[in-house]
Amino acid sequence: MKRITYFRPIEVLPVIIFLLGFALKTYHLPFAHVILLASGPMAFIILLLNNIFRKDKTFLPTKTMLALSNSAWLTYFSLRLLFLSGAPILFYTAIVLTVVTLVLSTYKKQLVVIQKLVLFVHVALGIFLMSYSTSKLYYSTVLGKSAKEYPEDYPYFVWDNYSWYLYDEQLYDDALDANVLAKISAKSAFKAGNMDSSIFYRLEDNKAKIENRNWKSNERF
């Protein structure tokens, strides 16, 4: 009887790449964005090629769905952690692909326990990130615990983005506080000759938009 291999260690490589990108982002090191965004397509390519070029010559449909599911999840995680548009759409796409994969696996019996476990972990982490406050996620991953003590250490546009996320969550007083920190950062950069005075007018304009409740997402830096 032909022995069918359902799992190979190379399948965990995209997850390792994603964790590497996340570690680089946590410490604000170069290439974090590129590595994070590469993990999703890499998951699909590796799993699909691993399924097509099998030594046992057996094509497993469930593995193709698994490739799509893992790719969608890793791409969603990357977009969410990088605060890029399209994350909600990918979240619901990943949910649908995961359900199809698990339903298909109950009939085909082509997934091992570790593969199903990874899918469940993806779902749990996805739901957590989807429901977690964007402003808190931004502060913890982009700024850091002591950021408010040294606002000049971070670019003014980072504080402006943080101010927007607070505003979007209707935390208007906190959004105004973040706007003040953006001005402190901008003042430091202006003194160092790294920016022109027009930035102060934009930050003041954003402050007015917070107070008047009419700040739109495309009006950030």
Image (tube, rainbow, N blue to C red):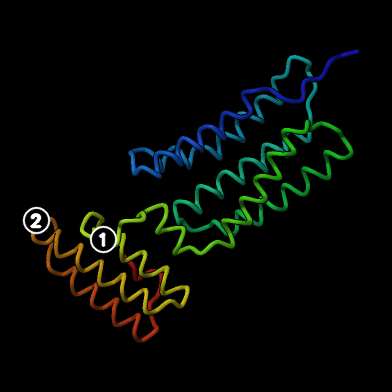
Q: Mark 2: which secondary structure?
A: loop
Q: Position of residue 217 (x, y in %)?
A: 41, 70
Q: In which quarter of the image is residue 104?
A: top right
Q: Where is residue 168 in the image (x, y as percent from the top left)?
A: 45, 73
Give left or right: position of 82 versus 212.
right
The amino acid beneath tag 1 is: Glu
Task: Return the residue at label 2.
Answer: 192
- 101 left or right, relative to 121: right
Q: Which residue carries the number 1 mark?
A: 149
- Residue type highlighted by circle 2: Ala
Which is more N-terminal, label 1 or label 2?
Answer: 1
Residue drawn at (61%, 41%) of the image: 71
Quadrant where the C terminus sits is: bottom left
Residue occupying image coordinates x 75% and y 38% = 116
- The residue nearer to you, when weighing 199 against 181, is 181
Q: Quadrant of the N terminus?
A: top right
Dot 1 falls on a residue whose secondary structure is helix
For the residues labelled 2 and 1, the Cα–Cα distance comes to: 20 Å
Frontmost of labels 2 and 1 is: 1
Q: Find the residue positioned furthest to the bottom.
A: 212
Residue at the (45%, 62%) spot, across then down: 136
Nearer to the camera, 144 or 190: 144
Question: In the visual, does 87 lie left or right of 191?
Answer: right
Q: Dot 2 surroundings within 10 Å: few (below 14), some, or many (20 or more)?
A: few
